[in-house]
Amino acid sequence: MAIAVFFVAAALAVAGGIGVVTFRQPIRSVLSLVVVMLALSVEFLLLSAQFIFVAQLIVYAGAVMVLFLFVIALLGPARETGRGRLRFQAALSGLFVLALLGLLWSMLQGIQYRQPDQGTDLSTFGTVQSIGIGLFTKFLYPFELTSLLLLVAAIGAIYLSRKEGDDR
């Protein structure tokens, strides 16, 4: 049963990713990205990573996608009609396809990925408790620096969005 759920979620993720790239309307691309995020959250649940599953649903499929939809609705389709192709778009696309084919070839050649450490308890791996312990002990300073960086970015975005002479 789990293998069937895995393949259905994987097919949805691939189809959603293709939809993100191929749809011309930005709203449809964002909705395809929501499908990808939901399918990835199912994959995390199958890996017994409950915290990442919930974070994927709430943060990415919820908040970030709503933000993308608001930005697209705010800008409207009139602003993106004058945009053409990027300068090196064809060359970059070819490079990414070659990288993907190289990764696929190396996976099919039997390259083994690093196994988990022997001391790792896989029964608690990815749970809320293990992530909380790691986040507030070993990774406390990077976590706090990230929150400070996000706060500075939010203040900078507010400052840059102000109009001249707006003293509110």
Image: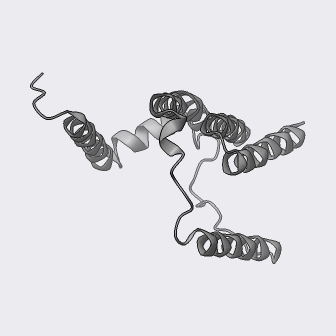
Q: Is residue 69 above or below residue 105?
A: above
Q: Is residue 76 above or below residue 86?
A: above
Could you tell me which quadrant the C terminus lies in? top left
Left or right: 20 in relation to 69? right
Q: Quadrant of residue 157?
A: top left
**Which residue is at a point 59% across and 40% down the rendered structure image?**
124
Q: Position of residue 86 (x, y in %)?
A: 53, 64
**Which residue is at a point 66% across and 34% down the rendered structure image?**
31
**Which residue is at a point 63% across and 68% down the rendered structure image?**
114
Q: Quadrant of residue 28?
A: top right
Q: Position of residue 67 (x, y in %)?
A: 47, 31
Q: Position of residue 47 (x, y in %)?
A: 70, 43
All told, the count of numbered labels is 0
Q: Position of residue 29 (x, y in %)?
A: 65, 40
Could you tell me which quadrant the N terminus lies in? top right
Q: Quadrant of residue 33?
A: top right
The furthest residue to the top: 168
**What colouring method underlies this structural image?**
one colour
* Nearer to us in this view, 98 or 162: 162
Q: Is residue 47 above or below residue 66?
A: below
* Nearer to us in this view, 89 or 139: 89
* Nearer to us in this view, 98 or 149: 98
Left or right: 114 in relation to 13? left
**Which residue is at a point 61% across and 37% down the rendered structure image?**
30
